[in-house]
Amino acid sequence: MEEPIIRYDALDKGVGLITLNRPKVRNALNTELREQMAELFTQLNDDPQIKAIVLTGGDTVFAAGADINDFLTTKTVDAYLRHSERYWDAITDCRKPIIAAVNGYALGGGCELAMHADIIVAGKSAKFGQPEIKIGLMPGAGGTQRLFRVIGKHKAMKLILTGDMISADAADQMGLVSEVVDDETTIERAIAIAETLAGYSPIALAQIKEVANLGVDMPLQGALALERKAFQILFDTEDQKEGAKAFLEKRDAHYKGQ
């Protein structure tokens, strides 16, 4: 029986674990894998039992980019009619916190996939890059845009124009990853972070994600107004009252997402 190209495990404490599983091609992101991943993120977004999501490629590689064999015959109309943006939108639109656990290569579409996460835990072996220029292409799933916003124009342009890879430590210094850990603890650390987040109010988590992602492209005064409104809205939730009571009573809060 064929191995699934994506594995999913519902872990304890409300954490969902998604593992890309095409090891023979370094988890290359073909259309079938992206379709299945989009469907899974859509399902988890609507699953009240799942509070946080960990995305990984396993112990040795995250994703080494798109499936280049596909590029030999693809025409402009083929690329357009696929509307691959909908696969990425399923991740972008997910209200749950997403933690990427990256070991080994995260290149091209793999680097773009990691940047769709809210938190990136990188193993020391991790390598990031956008090497599309080396095959006569350019990033097509946010590489030219997200990198600019995360690490700034000149660092981003060097990566995109040269196609160079950078180490986990260099990515950490640039602000591309959240933290660097030993390879054998990458997934474990990502799950631990996800478990912590899963213990918080899902409404507050969703509001933080929404405001942070929308605000980054807004003028500062508009973004601050958006933040204030979201902050004020949270006072009408049962979770907020429970959180305040638990703090004062020196006990763990029990959030219900209400």
Image (tube, rainbow, N blue to C red):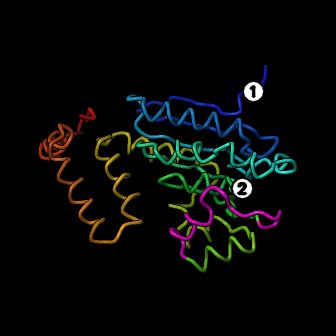
- Cβ–Cβ under 8 Å for marks 2 and 1: no
Query: Nearer the N terminus, badge 2 or badge 1?
Result: 1
Q: Is residue 77 magenta?
A: no
Looking at the image, which residue is at 43% across and 46% down?
97
Looking at the image, which residue is at 56% across and 72% down?
174
Give the alpha-carbon distance from disc 2 to disc 1, as whole Å.
22 Å
Looking at the image, which residue is at 38% across and 45% down?
197
- Seen from the viewer's position, the closer of residues 21 and 213 is 213
Q: Residue furthest front?
A: 77
Question: Number of numbered discs present?
Answer: 2
Amino acid carrying mark 2 in the image? Tyr
- Residue 171 figure quarter: bottom right
In this rendering, position of residue 103 left or right of residue 75? left
Q: State which quarter of the image contains the N terminus.
A: top right
Amino acid carrying mark 1 in the image? Glu
Q: Is residue 147 magenta?
A: yes
Identify the residue under disc 2.
Answer: 105
SS for dot 1: loop
In this rendering, position of residue 102 left or right of residue 217? right
**Residues packed near mark 1 inside 10 Å, few (<14), some (14 to 19) or many (20 plus):** few
* Region rendered in magenta: 133-152
Residue 38 placed where, x, y %?
A: 58, 38
Q: Is residue 256 above or below residue 125?
A: above
Q: State which quarter of the image contains the C terminus.
A: top left
SS for dot 2: strand
Residue 102 placed where, x, y %?
A: 62, 52
Indicate which disc residue 3 carries.
1
- Seen from the viewer's position, the closer of residues 230 and 217 is 217
